Image (cartoon, rainbow, N blue to C red):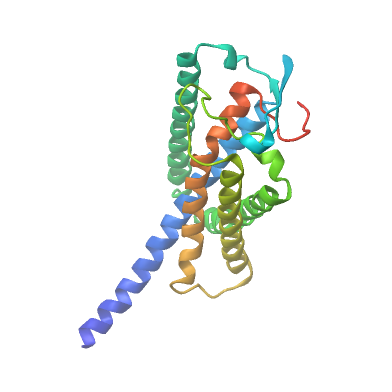
Amino acid sequence: MRLAKQKNKLIAPMKSSNLRFGSRMLIVILLLVASCEKSMAFSSHSTNIKTITAKRDRTANDYDTSLHIVSGIDEWPVVAQASVFVATYAGLIGGTWVGSTLLDDLSKSNLEQWRNTFIDKIIPLLLGTVYLTAGVGHFVAADAFRDIYPPPGTWGFWYLPGSAAFHVAWTGVVETAGGSGLLYAAINNNFSEDELEIPWILIQPISALALFLLTVVVTPANIYMFTHGAIMGDMESL
């Protein structure tokens, strides 16, 4: 019995340490992939070669899209468009892996204080605010988000079941919940000296993982903005 208690005392800190390490890695990966995704959306508005307007029947397709063609990729053969889509995804995955590996290696070299402050306190606060705001925006400005949902047939292979309104709604729910989870963890990390117990300590890694997977899932909308010049609502090209 005494040995079992001693074993539990040794295992508990190990579990907490592993959770903290996993949570940190997920936060770093989420930061990198979110940065790549948002920079892609920003670049789609950097120039404006020509403008066309494509109006669809809202009752049938549930969205009304204004397209500012920036790259001209939408005029390429379908196979070439699909290749750009795959190459963009591959670049995001490769860049995220390299960046997260480098950051993890650097943070192990006498940068524990940086890890404790930046990764545990600052990043969750920033990302939580960004994702929570974006999640609320899915409902406050639903039409704008539906405008950047790729219609069936985009890139020659995009045929996802469900309407644009449905996908905007469920991704908004996940963003709101995930952002709230990161904010909860950030507030505790910044203002409380007590370490959370299970299951509360799982909120940050679960939120980070959910938002990471969500970012991977919604990235086609940002690629659509790049390849087809889709804009959100009345937004003008920068």
Residue 19 location in percent, x, y? 41, 62
Residue 42 location in percent, x, y? 67, 31
**Residue at the spot 47% in from the left edge and 30% down from the top edge:** 89
**Residue at the spot 71% in from the left edge and 26% down from the top edge:** 55
Number of disc labels: 0
Can residue 48 be seen by looking at this rendering? no
Which residue ends up furthest to the bottom in the rendered image? 1
Relative to the observer, which residue lies in front, 12 or 237?
A: 237
Which part of the image, by quadrant, shows the C terminus?
A: top right
Residue 128 location in percent, x, y? 62, 55
Can residue 215 be seen by looking at this rendering? yes
Relative to the observer, which residue lies in front, 228 or 9?
A: 228
**Residue at the spot 54% in from the left edge and 40% down from the top edge:** 218
Displayed quadrant of residue 53: top right
Q: Is residue 161 left or right of residue 139?
A: left
Q: Is residue 3 left or right of residue 102?
A: left
Asked if 151 appears above or below 27 in the picture, the reply is above
Which part of the image, by quadrant, shows the N terminus?
A: bottom left
Asked if 68 appears above or below 108 in the picture, the reply is above
Q: Is residue 235 left or right of residue 40?
A: right
Relative to the observer, which residue lies in front, 115 or 32?
A: 32
**Residue at the spot 64% in from the left edge and 32% down from the top edge:** 41
Q: Is residue 61 left or right of residue 14?
A: right
Residue 162 location in percent, x, y? 52, 42
Asked if 177 appears above or below 25 in the picture, the reply is below
